Image: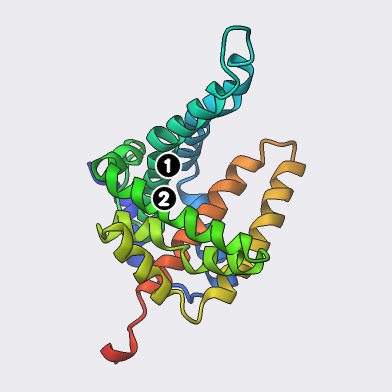
Amino acid sequence: MENPTMNNYASQTPMPEPGVSGVFGHSWDVLKKFLPELLLVVFIEILLSLPLGFANKIFNFPGFHPVSANLFNLVYTLIIVMPVNYGCSWVYLKAVRGEPFRVTDIFFAYQSFANILIANVLVFLIIGCGILLLIVPGIIFACKLAFVPYLVMDKKMEAVDAIRESWHMTTGYSGTIFLMGIVSFFIALGGIICFIVGIFPATIWISLAFATMYMAVSGRKKPEEL
């Protein structure tokens, strides 16, 4: 069933400007309106990530090979963490658009599991190679590929096409995305300082901000459409 509050919000909220203040301001409004639902989303995301932290302790017992923990972490990340992260990005995008969403939408990503897996591996390799080239190129590549999860989930793009389109879409906005990363660091730090539990709404706010940035950029007409 559609949430009328979300529909009203979608009709009343103008498209934000693709700038740091615009996207964080818009995402803050979304956070305040849908905090309970989004807290549940981030709790599920964190809960499903917990086995990664316990793996090293579990596989430390006698009888386990030293590489067992690393192998478990790799497989678990590929099968669980990556798809759920993409699914959460999809939920955050629907929230900033004011579209009806359900917490279970985070598992919608499994319909494109293979594509998500390929996209993650390619993005990891590209950014990893950039980091090896004196770190700065890696930061640039990370900014250029920030929209890949949204393009895969929103536009149903193949991995390579999503990487190419993200590279194109972020032209002229890489600096803004980099500044968003810096602002996000201080928001997360503030969340930790606020009795630690503040990290949960801080994480949601950051995630909503990047989803808003994608929405703002994708909503602008390309030069050939003007």
Mark 2: which amino acid?
Asn
Please tell me whether mark 1 or mark 2 is closer to you in this view: 2
Tell me which residue sits at (42%, 42%) in the image. 82
Label 2 crowd bin: few (<14), some (14–19), many (20+), radius 10 Å: some
Q: Is residue 109 above or below residue 127?
A: above
Residue furthest toward the top? 62
Between 104 and 68, the one lying in front of the other is: 68
Q: In the structure shown, which secondary structural element does the residue marked by tag 1 occupy? A: helix
Residue 129 image position (x, y, % from top left): 55, 60
Tell me which residue sits at (26%, 60%) in the image. 157
Q: Which residue is mark 2?
A: 120
Checking the image for residue 209, the label placed there is: none
Q: CA distance from mark 1 to mark 2?
A: 7 Å
Q: Is residue 11 above or below residue 190?
A: below
Between 34 and 192, the one lying in front of the other is: 192
Q: Which residue is mark 1?
A: 82
CB contact under 8 Å: marks 1 and 2: yes
Label 1 crowd bin: few (<14), some (14–19), many (20+), radius 10 Å: many
Q: Is residue 106 above or below residue 51?
A: below
